[in-house]
Every structure is written in structure tokens, then in C-alpha cells.
Amino acid sequence: MIEILIIADDQTGMLDTGAPFAQKGIHTEALMHVPTVEELRESDATVAVINTESRHIPPEEAYKRVYEIARIGAQAGVKILYKKTDSVLRGPVGAELAALGDALEGEVYFFPAYPKAGRITKDGIQYVNGVPISESAFRKDELNPVEESYIPGILQSTWELPVKLVGESQLKSWEPEKKRQIVVFDGENEEKFQQAVEYVTNKHSIQLVAGCAGLARELARSLPLTQKEMGNLPAMDKMFVLCGSSNPITRQQMDHGEKHGFLRYTLTREDLEGTQQIAAARKACQEGKSVILDMEYLSPEMLGITKEELGELVVSSLGQALIRCMDVLEGYVLFLTGGDTLSCFIRKSGCQRIEVKGELSPGIAVNVLHIGDREIYAVSKSGGYGSQEILEDLKEGKI
């Protein structure tokens, strides 16, 4: 039976939050549809992760999707309902946390930090690599620009709900109030973040929690779940990288990969289908070369469309391009960055099942995609995670 049900808002978030549990050998299953009560009760898995695809939708619709799944989980007897949030709080986070609390009429314990990935929470303000998130590169996010760093303000911008802050000095005197509210815990560094999670999980019975993949790492480490080591992973000397993220960190990673042996093919405004580029990428794969396939920077103004339409155009074009290369990717490991890109590929490829195998580093998960009779290893990465050298390090077996 499912004991922990994780509700994510995009595909990479779903997988990188399940990964720390899988890393410990905890049976973790990625659900490709809204489950029934019976499916959750009868599942052999301990942890289930599901993607509501709610990052870019109106708050009211996001609320409905999370509420529905949370109610199903509650009826199935799931012990912990976990709302996975973006590490820089993009999307209708307030609406989603409200839905989780309303579904069970209780407090939601929110741990937004992920110190190992450079995300910390101090005095209710979220930072990325020492900079308030509204002053970071995420302020210019194409679909979800981050214009606020104070977490209560972020939450209340999409839903009217009570928010309580618990800082380091208040932690030991804090007690649950058993009422509808979001309790936000600071996490200024790895040690303090662990202390906050451990204090809450040890002193109180947790049922409703929220946070990014950093919380998943702590729960996988501290909860009494059956554990074993992750099995051997394939060599990554042959990689096919599909990049649909415009995040500056990700673009730097692609630039570095291109300088260190990856052949890069970029779809352009003039040829969104990438006829010549895909032909060249296929030839490179037939020769066993590692490849990056991405798209040049485009703005809605360039094409006379909305930013939502542009986002769909980018991921659809890249997803279709990868489909056209699949027959020459025997022995390759896919590297898929950006949750929308991954979701599009999964839809277009007819993927029936995803096994979450573990994580390579914060925000970077290893999965097996079951497509027809093929099992394909795929590394999934959320847009802003990883070092500049991530592709080079993976290819050379340094991670």
C-alpha cells in the first residue's frame, strides 16, 4: 500500500522528489494518471509520485487538481500527503497548499529550503545561491516570473490563507495548532534544515507536508522505511540531451557541454521542425557521438503569440524532434531538462510507465522509461539545478 503520496506540479519535479526515496531502495512508483482509492491501497509501492501539470494554470484549477488527489489519498489511508513545490516557488503554490490543507482540514507543514542545492529560507524569505529569489535569474522566467521573495506574500498572491512563520529561535517552542493554516519553517543551512524537519517529524505526527526535493531527501533519510542501495546505473558515455529550458543556468550548462565534446543542434525560428538539424543529429548518434538538441531563444513578440503558446510551441517542437531520433538511440542515455519538455516527450512517445531509480545529485533524477517493449534510461533535471559542468561530469563518470 502507498504510504507517501507526492503531488508535484510538473514532470521533473515529480521525478526528482521521488528519487531520494528510490535511492534508498524504497519502492517508488510514478503514476501516469489520477489513481483510484483501490489502486493506492493495492499498490506494491511504498511511495507514489504524481504530476498534476499545474505549474502554468490558473489558481482555481490548480486547487481543484490537488484537492481531488489529496482526497483520494486520504480515503485510501495514505499516511503522508506531500505537496511538492518548486524550489523557487513558481506556480500557484498558495492555491495548491490551501487545497492540501482543505482536503484534510489541517495544518500543512511547509519546508521550502534545499540548502544542498543553494535554496535557503531565512525569516520567511527564500534565497537562491545567496540572492533573494525575486532578484535572481528566476525573476525573468518566461512563464512564471518570480517577483516576490517573502513566502507569505507569494502564497497569499494566489490564495487567501493564513500563514505562520517559524524561525530557528522559535522552533523548540512551536506546537501544532490543529487549524487550517500553512506553517513555514526556516532552513538557513543544511544542519538547521535537518533539525527543523527532524524536530517536526519526531515530535509530532506529520500527515500534510510541503517542500521541494530537499524535504524528500530528509524524509527518505529519517523515516522508518525499508531501505537498500540503488542498483548499478548505465555508463553515460553516449548521451542525448534535450533542452527546453530558457533558464540562464541551464543555457550555461549547454554551452559548457558544447565546448567539451557534445555536438549541438539548435532548432531555429526559420525551421521549427529542424529538418536539417535533426538529420545531422541522427547522423551523429549513428556515429556514437553525444548530442545536445535545443532551440534558439524566442520571445512571444517575435512570433506574435502569447508566452503560453510559445512555451507549448518550444516543447512540442523539441519533443517531436526527439521522437524522430529514437530509432538511432540504442545504448544512449537521455538527458531531459525542463519539466514541460519531459511531459511533452512522455505524451508523444506513448510512455506507459516510469520507474524512479534514484538521484545523481540534488534535482537530478535517474529513471527508466517504459516505451513499448523498450526500457530507456533517462536523466531528468529541473531547469535551475546542477553545476555548469554537469554534462561533462556525467559523460566522464564523475557523478
Image (tube, rainbow, N blue to C red):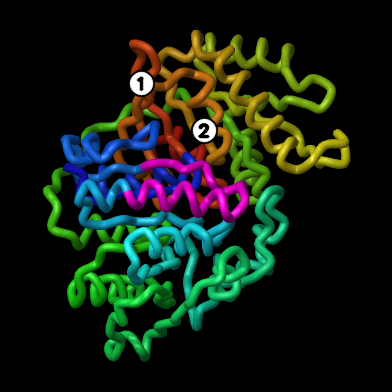
- Would you say residue 326 sits in the magenta stretch? no
The segment highlighted magenta reads: 50-71
As shown in the figure, which amino acid type bears the numbered disc 2?
Ser
Quarter of the image that includes the N terminus: top left
Based on the displayed image, in which of its 4 quarters is residue 174 positioned?
Answer: bottom left
Based on the displayed image, in which of its 4 quarters is residue 282 positioned?
Answer: top right
Question: In the shown orientation, is residue 119 left or right of residue 39?
Answer: right
Location of residue 170 in the rendering, given as x and y in whole percent from the top left corner: 36, 89
Q: Residue at x 24, y 35 (%)?
A: 39
Q: Is residue 282 visible?
A: yes
Q: Residue at x 66, y 53 (%)?
A: 144
Q: Give the labeled residue for mark 2.
A: 343
As shown in the figure, which amino acid type bears the numbered disc 1?
His
Quarter of the image that includes the C terminus: top left
Q: Is residue 187 visible?
A: no
| Circle 2 crowding by C-alpha within 10 Å: few under 14, some 14–19, many from 20 | some
Location of residue 92 in the rendering, given as x and y in whole percent from the top left corner: 57, 57
Local SS, label 2: helix
Q: Residue at x 41, y 44 (%)?
A: 14
- Would you say residue 68 sits in the magenta stretch? yes
Q: Residue at x 58, y 28 (%)?
A: 262
Residue 69 or residue 376, whichever sits in front: 69
Location of residue 146 in the rendering, given as x and y in whole percent from the top left corner: 65, 62
Q: Give the labeled residue for mark 1.
A: 370
